[in-house]
Amino acid sequence: FGEVAQRWSEIIKPRIEDTTFANYRKVMNKHVLPAFGNTPIADITSLDIETFISKLKVGSKTKLNILTPFRLVIKFGKKHGIIHSNPFADVDPIKSSKSRPAGVLSLDEIRCFVEVLDDFWKPLFILLFFTGVRIGEAAGLKWKRVDLVNSVVQIRKTIVYVSGTYVYKKPK
């Protein structure tokens, strides 16, 4: 599996955003390769994958993030005839959490948090909490894109960390 994952990563790296590639590499190195790196890719079964998923002590969103590059490597292997079937075809989908996800603050918790902030930081955190703007998008925001009269904020750029430096990019 590890050798196929290496070949896949060399091919997809120029096709995807640097930040996406870095995230794929991080979850592959932390979760997938320790479990499957030395396993022949043809020997990986849907039972192996479901067992792996059941042992992940993370939320459903993180599980999906971990499984994305894993699934793509398996798909790559099938596409190029390295394996004849895709074991992910028989893996049950990840069910999302019905309750409030861990780490999500209630309105009362947000109010308490904002009340203790220094006045300098309050506008930033109010923007983040109530708009869904990502921190990189807030960092890339220019005053000319803020219309306080009409309560409109235009997100045109985001700041991301790529190869040791911060750069402006188009937001998602």
Image (cartoon, rainbow, N blue to C red):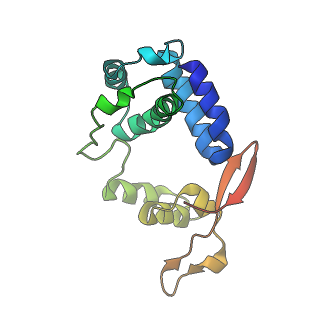
Q: Residue furthest bottom?
A: 149
User: In the figure, residue 97 lies in which quadrant?
Assistant: top left
The image shows residue 19, relative to residue 168, as above or below, that is above
Residue at the image point whose x is 45% and y is 59% from the top: 114
Whether residue 57 is visible to the viewer of this picture, yes or no, is no
Query: In terms of depth relative to the viewer, which is nearer, 24 or 148?
Result: 24
The C terminus: image quadrant: bottom right
- Residue 54 placement (x, y as % from top left): 31, 24
- Name the residue furthest left: 98
Residue in front for this viewpoint, 120 or 82: 82
Image quadrant where residue 56 sits: top left
In the displayed structure, would residue 149 be above or below residue 163? Answer: below
Residue at image position (66%, 40%) is 13
Give percent across and percent down for residue 83: 46, 23
Which residue is drawn at the image coordinates 66% and 72% (left, top)? 142
Q: Position of residue 15 (x, y in %)?
A: 64, 47
Q: Nearer the viewer, residue 80 or 150?
A: 80
Q: Is residue 45 visible?
A: yes
| Residue toward you, 74 or 135 | 74
In the displayed structure, 130 sits above or below 160; it is below
To which quarter of the image does residue 52 belong? top left
In this figure, what is the number of numbered marks? 0
